[in-house]
Amino acid sequence: MSDVFHRPRDWKIEPAEKRFVVTWDDGAVTEYGWEEMRRACPCAYCAGEGTFKGTVDATTKFTERQTTMTEVHPVGRYGVTPVWGDGHDTGIYTYKMLRRAAGLE
């Protein structure tokens, strides 16, 4: 794994394609599908924490609202939090997590 810590230069929500696009400081551009991002939500409620299993797995069925990204907010200098159509907004997707998911780390 690289010792370099990359950050986004820009990002955008593309509603028609249902994807989140990130342009990184090294020039790489990555795309993430909304449903895949929601399924990978790292929050304690979705992914679990400690002895709590979490509520999302490969068989979870989502509604349209649950997989509609409405906003994205930066979290410190290390990640972003999407806001989903159902109001869910507790998952922090670190930049390392996003780059790893795109095969960049």
Image (cartoon, rainbow, N blue to C red):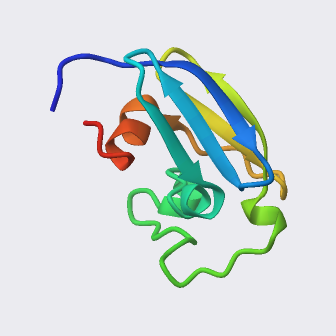
Viewer-proximal residue among 52 and 104: 104
In the visual, does 92 lie left or right of 13? left
Q: From what the image shows, is residue 56 above or below residue 15?
A: below
Q: Quadrant of residue 14?
A: top right
In the visual, does 54 lie left or right of 11? left
**Residue 27 at x, y = what percent?**
42, 20
Point 84% across, 55% down: residue: 85
Point 47% across, 61% down: residue: 48
Viewer-proximal residue among 77 and 34: 34
**Picture quarter with the C terminus:** top left
How many dots with numbers?
A: 0
Viewer-proximal residue among 82 and 51: 82
Point 83% across, 51% down: residue: 87
Q: From what the image shows, is residue 32 above or below residue 11?
A: below
Q: From what the image shows, is residue 55 above or below residue 29?
A: below
Point 55% across, 38% down: residue: 92
Viewer-proximal residue among 89 and 34: 34
**Residue 23 at x, y = what percent?**
52, 26
**Residue 84 at x, y = what percent?**
77, 51
**Residue 96 at x, y = what percent?**
36, 33
Q: Quadrant of residue 104?
A: top left
In the visual, does 16 lie left or right of 50? right
**Picture quarter with the N terminus:** top left
